[in-house]
Every structure is written in structure tokens, then in C-alpha cells.
Amino acid sequence: MKLNLTWLFLLTAVSTSVQSGTAAIESNSPAQFSPSQTNRILSITERAEQIRAQCIQGKRCICGKILKVLPDGLVIESGYTNLLRSPLDRSWLLPGTVTASRATNLVESKEPDAVCIGLVFLSDLPKPRLAKAKQYDYVILRAFPAGEYSYTSVGDVHRIVRRFSYKLEEAVQFQLKMEAAKTPPATVVK
């Protein structure tokens, strides 16, 4: 898995460079990278591994009520710890008819797999077996931090919440994209 992720980022870096118009590659000769570009590609790979480790360390248990269903994910009020009881913990999506309440005076720990508290956005969801997620249904998932998410809650009220992804690779890619948007792309020379 680690090797596949490394090649993915290497290819993404080269692809981004080629697509940005900064690459000059002759059709009869292979691309040559300068030492600084090679170091940049290696640093991207190293950074991806750092982000991956941070995502694993920041993994949280999202157990809560769906407040809003959006095309790219769910806004969830997390902290419903009594959803973690058996037999409810056998499914990631529970109907709104389940009896559950939000825990009071609960503080989120910084340990991996800690229960997440507060409003969060959850993306890259597993495929539901029977029913689609609806507002006021409940969710129980382990998810990885993937930056922030901005949405409009009621009227013109704009909110920014923590973003989590069900898939580790998606969380890493999202954070790398956010960082890449802040830095200029690598160049390829002949």
C-alpha cells in the first residue's frame, strides 16, 4: 500500500507539471529531472507519508446525527456515544428512529479512535446496503481528518467545520491538494 501511494504521488507530480505547461519533453527522449526537481518529488512523497501518519494519529470515531445531506457528504453532529452499544454498532448507518442522545460534558481526546465531538463534515462514505442516508439518521464510522469544510447551514449562515474522510487515501490526497494549491508546481527540463 505504501509503495502504491508513493507512485501515485510521483505520477501526480509529473502529471501536474506536464499539464501546467511548464514541461518541455521531446517525443523521442525520456524526461529528465534536475536534482532540485527530484528532491521536490521526493519531498512530496515524504510529505504524503507525514500526512498519512497524521491522519492515522487523528482518526476519530464519528457517532452522531446527520444534520444535512449534501452532494459530497454529510454534516453530522457527533458525540452520541450511546450509539456505540451492541447491536447498533454493527452498521454504519442507522435510522432516525433509533433512541440516542448526545453525551454531556464530554471532551474529545487527542488519541487515535477517540470519539469526535461537535459538528463535522464526513465525505467518501461507504456504499449503503439498503437505504440512503437521510437527515436525522445516525452514523457510526471511523474516519480520518481531511482539513476543513465550508457550507451554508441556515439562510446565509456560513459555517466552517472539520472535514473527515472515511477513506485514508482520500484524506491524504485532499490535504496534499490543499498544500499544492499554496505552492507553485514542479517544472520538468530537458
Image (cartoon, grey):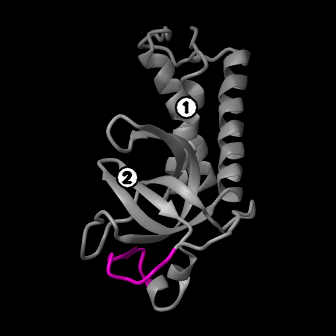
Q: Position of residue 178 (x, y in %)?
A: 55, 31
Whole-percent x, y for residue 131 in the image: 24, 73
Q: Residues within 10 Å of mark 2 (few under 14, many from 20)?
A: some
Where's the N terminus, which quadrant? bottom right
Q: Quadrant of the C terminus?
A: top right
Q: Nearer the viewer, mark 2 or mark 1?
A: 2
Q: Is residue 105 above or below residue 19?
A: below
Left or right of residue 110, residue 145 in this image? left
Q: Mark 2 or mark 1: name the one nearer the start of the chain.
A: 2
Are the residues flagged by discs 2 and 1 in contact, CB closer than 8 Å?
Answer: no
In the rendering, which numbered label is found on residue 178? 1
Q: Is residue 71 left or right of residue 44?
A: left
Q: Residue 34: image x %, image y %?
A: 68, 14
Could you say whether the residue bearing mark 2 is in a helix, strand or loop?
strand
Is 36 situated left or right of 182 in this image? right
Seen at 53% across and 32% down, the residue is 177
Write down the region rendered in magenta: 90-101
Residue at x 54% of width, y 41% of height: 148
Amino acid at dot 1: Met
Look at the numbered disc 1 and give the secondary structure of its residue: helix
